[in-house]
Image (cartoon, rainbow, N blue to C red):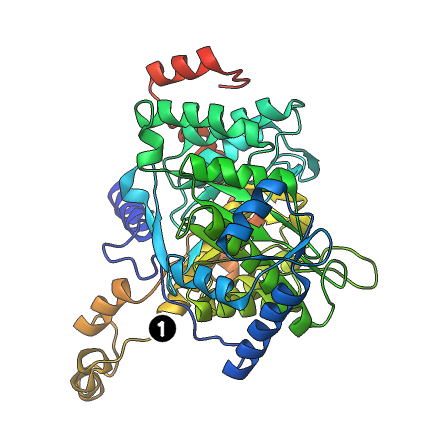
Amino acid sequence: MCSATTRAGRQKRLAQRAAKPVVDPCPPGQTGGTYKPLRDDELQSIYDTALKLLVNLGLGEVPERLRIDLLAAGAKDGAPGRITFPPRLVEEAINQAPTSFVLHGRDAARSITVGDEAVHFGTGGAAVQTLDLDSRLYRPSTLQDLHDFTRLQDTLPNISWYTRCCVATDIADSFDLDVNTVYALLKNTTKPTATSFTLAGHVAPIVEMLDIAAGGAGEFAKRPFMKAHISPIISPMRFGEDAVDVVYECIAHNIPMSCITAAQAGATAPATMAGFLAQSLAETLASLVMVHAIQPGYPMIFSNWPLVIDLRTGAFAGGSGETAVLNAASAQLSNWLGLVSGVACSMTDAKAIDAQYGAEKGLTSMAAALAGGNLIYESSGMTASLLGVSFEAFILDDEMHSNTYRALRGIEVSTDNIGYDAILEAVLGDGHFLGSAQTLAAMERDYFYPTHADREQPRTWAENGAKDAWSVANEHVRAVLSTHKPAYLSPDQQREIKARFNILLD
């Protein structure tokens, strides 16, 4: 019979094993860049073609204010309604763009530096459906879901920044939607965050809310802890006026931006991968030139997101091998140009938390990370080809990211860790390495121990209820949501925000 002392000792050991080690073997920000799907000459060819598209074809549907600024910066009038970009202007924009910058968290300890070949996983998406914790079926996403997703991810160490992952479909008014989305982020996390603005007119009043959270009028702009997701280019090769207006407002209020190109192979961009990359690169470079023309050197995430459709049906194929290689190539191109890169991976087409889910997420996220994508969007929680989002997926994806970071970290080779003397000692002594000083040191320094992946024997697994990953993650989610109720806004801040805005859920 097991004594109380034995049980207490075992529980203590299990708790110690579950806790983060003193030295984290796989923290965010590991270096990528070893996977290079494109040769140097292929990179140059794609870039040269992008420049040809920009100088000969250019962009259409240019808003007049932007047209004036682009012409002043060195762009040229092209065919009727289009504006072209000389290579000199494009290269000037690239050279003046920052190679790295800080994404601030409201808690400074949670800020991250993005750029070079450091890899960070985060969120994205605008899912309109949530995989319900009880029914395991999809239903419309709500504002309550957004609050819950935000406080759940607040506990997950491998989500380096948080973009709202779902749309609160229970809010009809677009201004109320933008306001309540930002409020959910402010109330439930102090990580770097991101949101989107439906209209340019929503930016200034929401900055007033951000100022309240930052400590007073004008404080947010001094240290902006929220960036904007904007898609100012509509494929193929034209501007979107509403999004361009948002760009101007964000720059006016010192809000960092991810300017996102999301062309679809075979639909809004060529089906050939090389042609796709050339057009998509040209479009994202056009966003960079736009920002450069408004304010040179302004921090912009170069978010070139290649998306793929199933050419037989037109359905989005977010978990495909083509998505993996195209986003890896996009990261490689951005790194080659010295720009802070954003790509999109882990967008499984699976609806359930099943084998398809795991295979597609593992394949696409690893490819983007190995290629050195600085910010890997959509990488946590997304399901059903971005139409859905899952609480359980957040938990399982976070553990997947630890394994990916461990793979990126690679193998350190030194006299000490090769351990010639330790091998001699083990072979000539006990005949094994269990319990040796070298093994104990490596145990915490070099190895990641999962919380949710099951490594028990089949008999033990069966005795513990024969749970699959979905069930284990579901239990974890329920535990977090029942206990983690952060109060990142003070009572005074909440009262001031509620007095000025229509806050629909608290």
- Tell me where residue 250 appears, x and y as whole percent: 47, 37
In the image: residue 400, left or right of residue 418: right
Q: Which residue occupies the foreground of this view, 492 or 420? A: 492
In the image: residue 325, left or right of residue 408: right
In the image: residue 283, left or right of residue 266: left
**What's the amino acid at mark 1?**
Gly
- The image quadrant of residue 68 is top right
- Tell me where residue 28 appears, x and y as whole percent: 36, 56
Q: How many marks?
A: 1
Which element is circle 1 on?
Answer: loop
Residue 330 visible somewhere in the drawing: yes
Q: Residues within 10 Å of mark 1 (few under 14, many from 20)?
A: few
Say which residue label 1 marks: 410
Where 408 falls versus 376 (above or below)?
Answer: below
- The image quadrant of residue 143 is top right
Q: Residue at x 58, y 22 (%)?
A: 176
